Amino acid sequence: MNQRLSTAVPYLIAVVILVALPLVLQSYYLSVATMILIFGLFAMSLNVIFGHTGLNSLGHAAFFGTAGYVTGIAIVTYGVKSFWTSAPLGILGAAVTAAIFGIIALRVSGVYFLLVTFALGQLLWTVAEKWNSVTMGRSGFVGIPAPDLGLSFLDLESPVGFYYFVFVVFSVCYYLMARLHRSPFGYALQGIRERESRMRALGYNVWLYKYIAYIVAAVFAGMGGILYAHFNGSIAPSHVGFSTSALGMLMVILGGAGVLWGPVLGAALIILLQGFASLLVPARWPLILGALFVIGVMGFRGGIGLHMVKTVRRVFSRGSNQG
Amino acid sequence: MAVFTICLLNGASFGCVLFLLSSGLSLVLGLMGILNLAHGVLYMLGAYIGWTIAAHLGYSFWIAALTAGFATGVMGLIMERGFLRRLIGLPNEQVLLTIGFVYIITNICLWIWGSIAKPPFTAKFLTGAFTVVGWPYPYSRVAIIVVGLSVAFGLWWLQEKTRIGAIVRAGMDDREMTKGLGINLELIAGALFFVGAFLAGFAGVIGAQLIGANLGHGLDILLLALIVVVIGGMGSVQGSLVGAMMIGLVDAFGKILFPDFAMFMLYFLMVIVLVIKPTGLLGRKL
């Protein structure tokens, strides 16, 4: 009981802070907070295959962007009004893309998996940029309205309303991913990460587990992409390709793949820094981002989240049970 | 028939540029297991340095190519000695680190050379054209093929016929065992990284005869080089040559036959090779 309470307290504090944020933040900072939740969801979804299964994908934005595009096209081009239709369409788009890419990419492993997922992501980027009649080409697909939930008392056009909407979706996805992580399926994935040959010897269909994990991760990434498309009102080829994929990977590594909320922490750091840098030195942001990649890799391997957890544990255990 | 011959030459010349680039990437990946995503920006940096020396300052094209290669080689050596050597066996960290270099070098290039693309340039004695099957064809493209095939032969000879090549091949097969025999593999690995980075910058200047220098090349050309490595297989000079020539030819013929889908043909080729032989056509086993 005590154990359960002590794990629940940090979550309660986080929820209280996140719910109270709109009361203290101005609309610009509230939009930054919304961005953090959206990219936190994206980074967590990447961690389902990256941290938990050990598949290093460099093309995860493919699902983020595809879902965003599909939702946008459904709403703007085909006039699908309700969020309850457009969002499932977007998620279906991401899942189908993952089902196809997974068959190709999972033929290889290790570094080759990186190369192939990278190439497949860039393939979608080419499609998004070249298929002008459908995707509006290089400048991106624009004019995506706020989601229409069919609930008239909710004003999702206002920053505060949209923030709470994103918060609810984020919380549901977080809960589902946490459950997945601690389910038999999740443990099997971690077993595959640790020793694939042993899992195979135990009778697990390793390929199928990886394939399903790949699709599940794509579904959550797609949810992030849908939120982003509504939030930004547009989605661009870069959201399908390399730069967004790499950013997601940096968020996971910087925040810590070993901790469930690590990727969210990473996302918060990157988005906050991006916010400040784009105000102060917009032309040099790539330079700062590049330096961040280098510093993050050289200095914080294992992630900031893991360092935080260790520090907290050390403080609370008073060093009594340290072996 | 004329169109066919021209396409063949175009494909072979672009394939040779891709070979110069991807051979370094493939050998470094094969020997050290290092995936250097900054290889493409080294190419781009080489092209810009070459443009400055040859087109802007007016020195010889070949001096420009060698200087650019040397500069990117030193750059590569710094990346390897300072950073990548500590990340052996950590592919994710290598990828993130080299992505960091992609952003840094691209932004510095933007700072120095601006956002306007530099036009193609070539050596003075290569500016003319001769007649192939009734069409004028530039000397510069033929020069690219000659340079590319010479380097390919040189690398093949180095890897298959010399003692250093034998050490490199042994290191790819069994790293620990090679070290255990008292061979300074770190030294060889560093030298190989320098050669790979040198070839990337050199390829940038050679390739600038076709496509000039452009800030987008850092990623565009990297993508092509990675597809070459996937198709040809890592750690093999012959594999890189075969893969690069296939990509070059498919690209050249694709642009004529299906102008809108040329890029997709390359992916299609990659997927077919992955389905038939996941380790690449001539690759070593992982």
Image (cartoon, coloured by chain):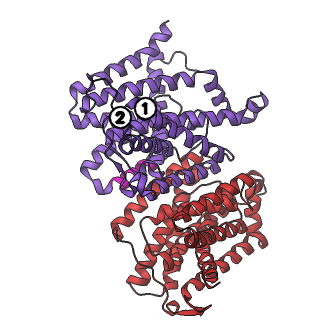
- At x 66%, y 71%, the residue is B245
Which residue is denoted by mark 1 in the rendering? Answer: A85
Quarter that holds the C terminus of chain A: top right
Closer to the camera, B205 or B90? B205
The picture's colour for chain A is purple
Q: Which residues are magenta?
A: A285-294
| Chain coloured red in the rendered structure | B
**CA gap, disc 1 to disc 2?**
8 Å
- The disc at residue A81 is 2
Closer to the camera, A133 or B192? A133
Can residue B31 be spotted in the picture? Answer: no
Q: Residue A287: say if magenta.
A: yes
Vertical relation: A290 (above or below) B260: above
The crowding category of the residue bearing disc 2, from other C-alpha atoms within 10 Å (few below 14, some 14 to 19, many at least 20), is some
- The disc at residue A219 is none
Can residue A68 be spotted in the picture? Answer: yes
Q: Is residue B103 left or right of residue A161?
A: right
Residue A77: give x, y in percent of width and height: 38, 45
Which chain letter goes with mark 1?
A
Q: Residue A303: say if magenta.
A: no
- At x 62%, y 43%, the residue is A102
Closer to the camera, A22 or B85? A22
Q: Mark 2 belongs to which amino acid?
A: Lys
Residue B94: give x, y in percent of width and height: 55, 50
Vertical relation: A72 (above or below) A310: below
Extreme-front residue of the structure: A78
Residue B79: give x, y in percent of width and height: 52, 59
